């Protein structure tokens, strides 16, 4: 049997939206108890536009803003540091060259050797003759180096050479003159470097992490009221008005006004729902007494047996319609417990088993427990079977054949009830679960209140499940219920 995909265990039933199966009627094989073929879209949620949640959208926008601000700040800092750093480095190098030149000029030949050795050992500065055959690499690898070179040439005069290596020896080399002799001054380049790139990356990484943390906190604070509002709205949608109250003392004025307005709306809706339930229950209850008197008078005063039977049948129909009103007006609260699905189905079929115009084909998986209200689930099964009895008679035989199948998979249980009747026109399928809606004339030979499938849909959703309707490919109407599987099954 080809079953459409079940929801995964990560999906929660409260997120489901009621949807309808729309299967194209067509020629299909299979026996009366055979598989019910459906389209892959059977009972799927309406197509949603893919996108980020509001929290992540706000988070990414704030993170982008903060990260861009950090980059701009670092770039501005480097730009402001560039010129002062170049001038300061040139000043230090030129001072070092001038001091070395002055020391060499004013020292005698004996002391000069000792002076050069002392400068090399203690200060890391070497002075050596500059030969014409020396090979060097210019100190102009970046904009800062070029700026330092220009400043040194201005301070030390023409003929100044700045190099990064001489004869393959790295360092900061400055070529200068003493009288007519050319010299090299070599020192460690790291003494004049700007802030290392690694340091900038550490600053950038630290700023980015702090920005992401701040963006997450801000996004959470911004979206928390919307999340609470969304949860409260979902509770109202499920009829749980008591759990939909929002805090009316929040410090933000706009959010406080929204919460107050939402709470007043929820109170008004709860009052309307309560008044509706009381009104329907009262009307239905008050009608039973005159109906009982009419039935008694009919049986005692009408002598024609056929007329009496038709009148009694009409009264029974009115009584059944009143029962539907009471079922629909019943409060939304249900008590969910682990329920043996097979026992509920068999007990629901007990009232129909001796009817000569009905036949059942059962394919029930053993040992399946569902999370449901046993009484409400029994009413759901009975409503679906009664709907099939009224409108799903097989045209060739005039007998209602009902296939009931159960399957458990991925923490969900599927119950399928299918008849072999004429089915429903595709344009009517989306409206069958609307209260008081009546289908096409092919399925309205018997009268009713138009609440049976609406009650089923409402009850299944109250139990955290999902209900769908569609035409089977091989003929007949197919209904399907999905409920959460209880532990231990």
Image: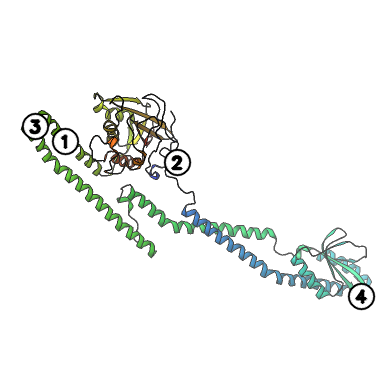
Image x and y of residue 324, in percent = 23, 39
Secondary element under disc 3, as helix, strand or loop, is: helix
Q: Which residue carries the number 4 mark?
A: 179
Image x and y of residue 78, in percent = 67, 66
Disc 2 + disc 4, Cβ < 8 Å: no
Sequence-first tag of 2 and 4:
2
Q: Which residue carries the number 3 mark?
A: 299
Q: Residues within 10 Å of mark 4 (few under 14, many from 20)?
A: few
How many numbered discs, if any?
A: 4
- The quadrant holding residue 266 is bottom left
Residue in the picture at 74% in, 66% down: 143
- Compare residues 479 and 374 and report the one nearer the observer: 479
Sequence-first tag of 2 and 1:
2
Disc 1 + disc 4, Cβ < 8 Å: no
Sequence-first tag of 3 and 2:
2
Q: Tell me how far mark 3 sits from mark 2, CA to CA.
A: 59 Å
Q: Tell me how far mark 2 sits from mark 1, CA to CA.
A: 49 Å
Q: Which residue carries the number 2 mark?
A: 10
Residue in the picture at 6% in, 30% down: 303
Secondary element under disc 1, as helix, strand or loop, is: helix
Between circles 2 and 4, the one closer to the viewer is 2
Disc 2 + disc 1, Cβ < 8 Å: no
Between circles 3 and 2, the one closer to the viewer is 3
Q: Residues within 10 Å of mark 2 (few under 14, many from 20)?
A: few
Does 153 sit left or right of 35 as displayed? right
Q: Which residue carries the number 1 mark?
A: 314
Sequence-first tag of 1 and 4:
4
Sequence-first tag of 3 and 1:
3
Q: Tell me how far mark 2 sits from mark 4, CA to CA.
A: 86 Å
Does 335 sit left or right of 15 as displayed? left
Image x and y of residue 292, in percent = 11, 37
- The quadrant holding residue 229 is bottom left
């Amino acid at each position: 049997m080809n079953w459409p995909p079940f929801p995964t265990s990560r999906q929660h039933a409260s997120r489901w939206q009621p949807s309808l199966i729309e299967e194209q009627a067509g020629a299909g094989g299979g026996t009366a108890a055979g598989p019910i073929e459906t389209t892959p879209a059977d009972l799927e949620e309406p197509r949603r536009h893919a996108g980020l949640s509001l929290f992540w959208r706000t988070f990414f926008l704030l993170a982008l803003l903060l990260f861009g601000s950090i980059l701009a700040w670092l770039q501005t800092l480097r730009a402001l540091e560039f010129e002062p750093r170049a001038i300061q480095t040139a000043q230090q190098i030129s001072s070092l060259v001038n001091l070395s030149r002055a020391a060499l000029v004013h020292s005698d030949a004996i002391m000069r050797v000792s002076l050069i050795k002392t400068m090399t050992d203690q200060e890391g500065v070497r002075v050596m003759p500059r030969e014409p055959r020396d090979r060097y690499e210019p100190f102009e690898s970046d904009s800062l180096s070029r700026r330092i070179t220009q400043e040194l040439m201005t301070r030390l005069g023409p003929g100044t050479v700045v190099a990064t290596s001489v004869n393959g020896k790295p360092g900061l080399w400055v070529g200068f003159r003493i009288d007519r002799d050319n010299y090299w001054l070599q020192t460690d380049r790291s003494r004049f470097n700007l802030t290392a790139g690694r340091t900038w990356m550490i600053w950038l990484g630290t700023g980015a992490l702090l920005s992401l943390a701040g963006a997450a906190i801000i996004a959470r604070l911004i979206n928390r009221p919307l999340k609470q509002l969304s949860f409260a709205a979902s509770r109202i949608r499920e009829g749980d008005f008591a759990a939909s109250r929002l805090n009316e003392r929040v410090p933000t004025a706009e959010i406080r006004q929204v919460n107050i307005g939402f709470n007043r709306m929820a109170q008004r809706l709860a009052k309307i729902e309560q008044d509706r339930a009381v009104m329907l229950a009262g009307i239905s209850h008050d009608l039973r007494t005159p109906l009982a008197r009419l039935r008694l008078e009919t049986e005692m005063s009408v002598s024609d047996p056929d007329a009496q039977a038709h009148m009694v049948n009409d009264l029974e129909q009115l009584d059944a319609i009143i029962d539907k009103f009471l079922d629909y007006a019943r409060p939304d609260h249900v008590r969910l417990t682990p329920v043996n699905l097979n026992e509920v189905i068999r007990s629901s079929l007990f009232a129909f088993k001796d009817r000569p115009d009905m036949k059942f084909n059962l394919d029930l998986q053993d040992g399946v427990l569902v999370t449901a209200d046993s009484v409400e689930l029994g009413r759901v099964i009975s409503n679906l079977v009664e709907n099939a009895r009224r409108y799903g008679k097989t045209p060739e035989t005039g007998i209602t054949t009902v296939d009931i199948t159960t399957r458990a998979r991925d923490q969900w249980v599927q119950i399928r009830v299918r008849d072999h009747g004429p089915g429903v026109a595709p344009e009517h399928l989306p409206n069958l679960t609307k209260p008081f809606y009546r289908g096409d004339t092919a399925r309205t030979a018997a009268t009713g209140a138009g609440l049976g499938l609406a009650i089923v849909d409402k009850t299944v959703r109250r139990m955290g499940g999902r209900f769908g309707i569609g035409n089977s490919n091989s003929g007949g109407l197919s209904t399907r219920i999905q409920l959460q599987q209880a532990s231990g099954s």
